[in-house]
Image: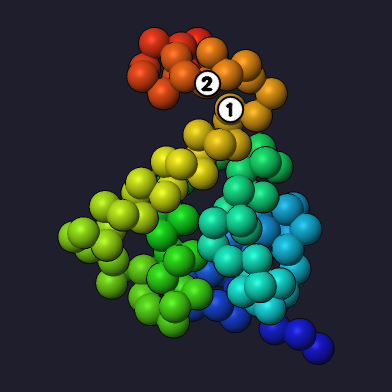
Amino acid sequence: MPDPVSAIQNLGPASAREYARAGIHTADQLRRLGADTAYARVISTGTRPHFIGYYALVMGLQGRPWTDCSGPEKAALRARFDAIVAACHDKGRSELETALNEIGVGTRR
């Protein structure tokens, strides 16, 4: 029987339920997809994005505790997280609306 998502360090039952809603049921599936693609799938199911959840996933896939993330590494992960969230939320919007959102004057949804 394949390892469940919760076999990955930092991911417990609540995370496993979120990933299951996104069609990700095993640790191997999650590893194959990678953190960015998997987290985008989770967001697309309506789960509210949460930075700690994202970087806990990244650290877990590296076999590291989530508390191991700090400094420049954490800043780089924040930039990746923000890009994932923006891409998920900008789907279906016009190029103009997406550009306005990027500079902070677009429609808030």
Q: Residue at x 42, y 41 (%)?
A: 82
Q: What amino acid type should be assigned to the residue bearing mark 2?
A: Thr
Q: Quadrant of residue 100?
A: top left
The residue depicted at 56 percent of the width and 36 percent of the height is 87
Q: Is residue 77 left or right of residue 17?
A: left
Single out the residue that lies furthest toward the bottom: 1
Local SS, label 2: helix
**C-alpha gap between disc 2 and disc 1:** 6 Å
Viewer can see residue 109? no
Give whichever of 19, 78 is nearer the camera: 78
Characterize the local packing of mark 2: few (<14), some (14-19) or many (20 or more) Cα atoms within 10 angstroms.
many
Q: Residue at x 51, y 44 (%)?
A: 84
Q: Where on the picture, by quarter, is residue 74?
A: bottom left
Q: How is the image coloured?
A: rainbow
Q: How far from the left and from the top, in percent, is residue 78?
A: 34, 49
From this viewpoint, which residue is outermost toward the front?
95
Instruction: Tell me the quadrant of the picture where the C terminus can be found.
Output: top right
Q: Is residue 60 above or below residue 19?
A: below
Q: Is residue 99 above or below residue 33?
A: above
Quadrant of the frame with the N terminus: bottom right
Position of residue 15 in the picture relative to residue 66 (left or right)? right
Q: Nearer the viewer, residue 12 or 82?
A: 82
Residue 98 marker: 2
Residue 93 % position (x, y): 63, 19
Numbered badge on residue 17: none
Question: Where in the figure is residue 95, as x and y percent of width and height?
Answer: 57, 19
- The residue that mark 1 highlights is 90
The amino acid type found where label 1 is placed reads Asp
- Dot 2 and dot 1 residues touching (CB under 8 Å): yes
Of pointers 2 and 1, the one earlier in the residue sequence: 1
User: Residue 104 location in percent, x, y?
Assistant: 36, 17
